[in-house]
Image (tube, rainbow, N blue to C red):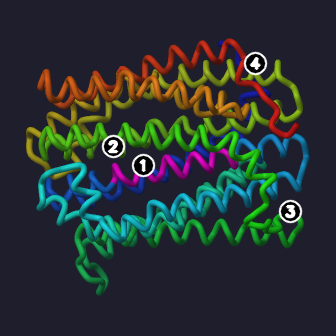
Amino acid sequence: MKINNGYLEEILRIGLPITMQSILQASYSLVDQIMVGTLGTMSIAGSGLVGKFSSLVNFTLAAVASVTSILVAQYHGNKDRDGINKGFFSCLYLAMAVMLLFLLPCLWIPDTILSVYTTDFEMVKEAVPYFTAIALSFIPMTLTMQFSALLRSIEKSKVPLYAGIASMIGNIIFNYLFIFGKMGMPCLGLIGAGIGTLLARSIESILLLGVLVFMRKKEELYLQPVSLFYTKQYKKIALIVFPILFNEFSWSVGENIYAAIYGRIGTQAVAAMTLTNPLQGMFIGMFSGVSAAATVMVGKRLGRDEKEEAYAIGKYLAKVSAAGACLASVLLIIISDCYISLFRIEAQVAETTKRILFVLALLLIVKILNMVIAGGILRSGGKTQYTLYIDLIGTWVFGVPFGLLAAFVWKLPIESVYFLLSMEEVVRLFITFAVFKRKIWMNNVTS
């Protein structure tokens, strides 16, 4: 692969801080799992159920944040300060409205929501208080996503990284204090992990807000709240956000169906899958910076109508991602035994976790290329209906049917179920490559 030093420098400047922040964000669940892991299999499984619903919220809100990135990156490339301002505030209002649609049911009927994933009443009872704390953390998480999307798209990606570091440190300290009852704090067990996450995410959003206020005072950034009813901007956003929102929501519902399938295989299966989630988040998070850099780098060129250079950057980013993903797969296999040894779990759960991690290593390159090409490059043009169609075919035509067949008809072990339903990633990648090569995704949304 020919190395373009200009592109590489731009990737590192924009993407490296984002990658590091994504790894830090994944550390939330890793820290929780390591500390909660000392409480036993039931607590691990309970936190896993909450994590699956939380991921549904996360991905849906990330859909709105991705629209913020698309709009701000193209307006930034076009040097349109007013466009950046209107795009940011319109997306912020929309994100808060979407967040409330999730938060209110979580506070009102948490046990009903968790019962979708399992028939084990004791597991649900264990998880409900933790679920409440995590649900409240959706508020600062939404703000953080929007603030970070704005800063990254104007090429200030180091700021969210520093806030993420502070948040991670806070998460470790708060978890230690509240899970185990140290330094005079109450010993709260699983709910203590939820309180730790809530406090840490609040710190992160407050720090980012402070930076934006400072930049506004220094006139480095034009920020002036627009009316909630500024319909002109909403029309533009709607054309981009609804396909993404439906896409991410649909994909996340599919992921939650997968979680329900695992939950009905058994508590040990849920625990094993739960333990693999932090590693999956961290390894895929290594390349989230490349995906986010793709949105900014390609989107900036599209905003200036430099379509050929935008396409060349897209090809380069895909090659970088493929090479890096191969190395990441090898590393995942190497560290899997050490990772599993961190937890106090039964031998059967440990062995199942190891087999699932091996399957994940095999699929990692496909997952990463889908994230970078579909989630970063294709979306940067604003024609988000293409990624919607790709994900709908992958999840609902292949993933969900194969998962149900593998678990309930063929009655395969969980690692085989995971492998078969993950074949939808391969299907999506083939379609993604075809759309990318045809260049039909390229569009200047600032026109």
For residue 79, say whether it is visible: yes
Tell me which label, 1 or 4, sits earlier in the chain.
1
**Figure check: 54 above or below 284:** below
210 on left or right of 416: right
* Mark 2 neighbour class, 10 Å CA radius: few under 14, some 14 to 19, many 20 or more: many
Quadrant of image for the C terminus: top right
Tell me which label, 4 or 2, sits earlier in the chain.
2
Q: Nearer the viewer, residue 26 or 133?
A: 133
Tell me which label, 1 or 3, sits earlier in the chain.
1
Tell me which label, 3 or 2, sits earlier in the chain.
3
213 on left or right of 306: left
Give residue 408's quadrant in the image: top left
368 on left or right of 155: left
Task: Please identify the residue farthest to the bottom as the structure is shown.
Answer: 184
Return the residue at label 4.
Answer: 312
Q: CA distance from mark 4 to mark 3?
A: 32 Å
Return the residue at label 3.
Answer: 222
Of the residues shown, which amino acid type is indicated by label 4? Ala
Image marks 1 and 2: residues in contact by CB distance under 8 Å:
yes
Element marked by disc 3: loop
Q: CA distance from mark 3 to mark 2?
A: 40 Å
Task: Tell me which secondary structure the magenta stretch mostly adopts.
Answer: helix
Q: Residue 65's spot in the image, x, y percent? A: 62, 50
Return the residue at label 1.
Answer: 56
